[in-house]
């Protein structure tokens, strides 16, 4: 069974802080993703990575960056958190043409 | 980008009845069509998917049908049970590793 683990379930940060969200998958999937989920807006893609050190912008990359130094780990970075980045962040992985396997989510509140 | 509409936004059925959720999309190049189920407070999980060379796929009480000409695909749940209560998302793939999620359908199965 695929396991996608997000390091923090709940975070509270202050405006301007740097925030790291970590995600690890244990199934050797080449593709990893970061989405944010907001009520009424569904899931929106922030960034994805198809290989180590490779990344592609999704639909809403502004204000975010990512890092993939190892195949199993994909990090989302908020360089300077803002209140409009308060959201649920979902990491996912994918093998080839399969569907997405999601982590449990990280609920971020920026005050 | 891809325009995805999901209907209805809420659906309430009696236990044992059938439920149908429809997803329309705009990109004729889409070739992979998954459905996800998200229970309250939990991660989205892939429940069924279909590829563009197939018109219908069934897995026990759930099925997905695809009409590529009309650019829509539907989720069918028969003999609904209270544990089917959740939010369901369609997410047609419109580009390499890019899925456009619908805004979700909240299904309530009344016992």
Image: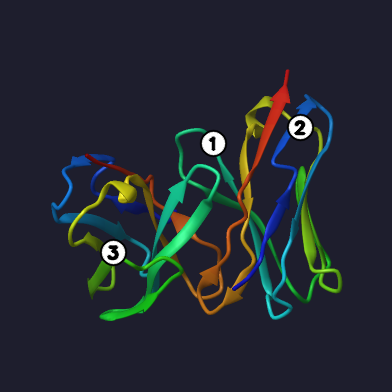
Residue B39 marker: 1
Nearer to us in this view, A60 or B38: A60
Q: Chain of mark 3?
A: A
**Residue A37's spot in the image, x, y percent?**
45, 49
Figure check: A16 above or below A67: above
Any part of residue A29 in sight:
no
Mark 1 vs mark 2: tell me if same chain: yes
**Residue named by callout 2:** B80
Nearer to us in this view, B98 or A65: A65
Quadrant holding the C terminus of chain B: top right
Any part of residue B64 in sight:
yes
In the image, A69: left or right of B8? left
Q: Secondary structure at mark 2?
A: loop
Q: Sequence order check: which comes first, mark 1 or mark 2? A: 1
Q: Quadrant of residue A35?
A: bottom left
Mark 3 neighbour class, 10 Å CA radius: few under 14, some 14 to 19, many 20 or more: few
**Residue A8's spot in the image, x, y percent?**
24, 44
**Residue named by callout 3:** A63
């Amino acid at each position: 069974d695929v396991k996608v683990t997000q390091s923090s379930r709940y975070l509270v940060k202050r405006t301007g802080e740097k925030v790291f969200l970590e995600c690890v998958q244990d199934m050797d999937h080449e593709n990893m993703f970061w989405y944010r989920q907001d009520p009424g807006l569904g899931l929106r893609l922030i960034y994805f990575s198809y290989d180590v050190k490779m990344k592609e912008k999704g639909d809403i990359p502004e204000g975010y960056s990512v890092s993939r130094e190892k195949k199993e780990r994909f990090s989302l970075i908020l360089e300077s958190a803002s209140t409009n980045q308060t959201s649920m962040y979902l990491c996912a992985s994918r093998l080839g043409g399969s569907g997405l396997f999601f982590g449990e989510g990280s609920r971020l509140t920026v005050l | 980008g891809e325009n995805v509409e999901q209907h209805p936004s809420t659906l309430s059925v009696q236990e044992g009845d059938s439920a149908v959720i429809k997803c329309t999309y705009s990109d004729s190049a889409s070739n992979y069509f998954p459905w996800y189920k998200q229970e309250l407070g939990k991660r989205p999980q892939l429940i069924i998917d279909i590829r563009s060379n197939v018109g219908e796929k069934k897995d026990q009480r759930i099925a997905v049908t695809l009409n590529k000409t009309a650019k829509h695909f539907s989720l069918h749940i028969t003999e609904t049970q209270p544990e089917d209560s959740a939010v369901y998302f369609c997410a047609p793939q419109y580009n390499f590793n890019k899925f456009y999620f619908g805004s979700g359908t909240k299904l309530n199965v009344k016992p």
